[in-house]
Amino acid sequence: MSTGPLDPPGVGESGEALAPIAPRHLAWPEHFDMAGDVESAWGRVLAARPAAERRTLLRADAFARERHEGQTRRGSDTPYWLHPVRVAMGLVQWGVVDRDVLVAALLHDVIEDTLTTPGEIRAAFGPRAESLVVWLTAPDARVMGDAVRGYYRRLLEQGPPDAHLLKIADRSDNLRSIQALVMRTGDTHRRWASAYLNRTQWQVLPLAAHAPSRARVALVTAMADLAPLVDPGAFTEP
């Protein structure tokens, strides 16, 4: 059982397989769950953005890191900020250049997982970024189980395409993180990982039906790569 960091998704395992048709290639960090490697890759992404946009993304990144201070990814000591940064990098890899979408990627968990309010996001980054983050904020399944299905139904039926794309990027990165977790810990988190994969099939996979091909590939391959680690029959590729 591997105890080290998870290597980045390979050419056959993610949207990187479609890099030849992407606007430009974005290499994943050497190990996508190690802070130094993610920071270096993120720095290269920012350096390629126009100066005004770079300043906004740096502000959003700093805002998210401050709000997520002290939080870590489930089952590890990986700083939480790696997740929203990777989500933003994944979107860039898919060819997304919309500043508000990238800002929302960096902030997508601050309402759900911190004391941040929508009004704070609106004041700092504008109404569109606020709206996208609100769309990405799911109810707490531990106390509002029935509301979760309603949330995903509304997201599918009423959510804007950019919110769908953000949710796909978020879930794809979560699946990769869970893949790393199961590789490290074996049975400890396997049952939870299987349940998460099963939820993804009804929560997020329907959003991919009309999403760009790079997003669909990233989500489906992340699901398919996790499935043999939790239950070989847990996911059948559509």
Image (spheres, rainbow, N blue to C red):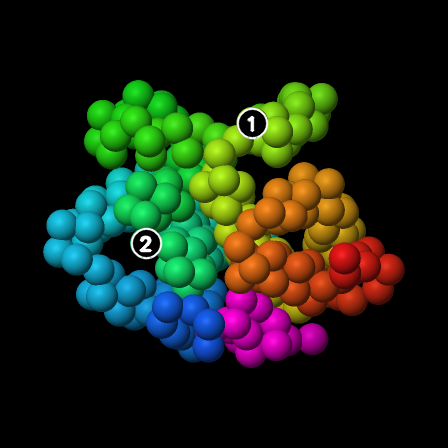
Q: Position of residue 183 (x, y in %)?
A: 66, 68
Q: Residue at x 45, y 41 (%)?
A: 162
Quadrant in which the N terminus is drawn: bottom right
Q: x%, y% of residue 152? A: 63, 31
Q: Nearer the viewer, residue 188 or 177?
A: 177
> Start and end of the magenta stretch?
1-19
Kindly identify the residue that appears in the image at 60 percent across and 47 percent down. Answer: 210
Q: Tell me the kind of residue under disc 2.
A: Val
Q: Which mark is residue 158?
A: 1
x, y (%) of residue 165?
Answer: 50, 46
In the image, is 58 to the left or to the right of 193? left
Q: Mark on residue 168?
A: none
**In front here: 95 or 142?**
95
On residue 97, which mark appears? 2
Task: Decide which of tag 2 and tag 1 comes sooner along the chain.
Answer: 2
Distance of label 2 from label 1 (alpha carbons): 23 Å
Task: Tell me the element at label 2.
Answer: loop
* Up-down relation of residue 66 to residue 116 (above or below): below
Residue 13: in magenta span: yes
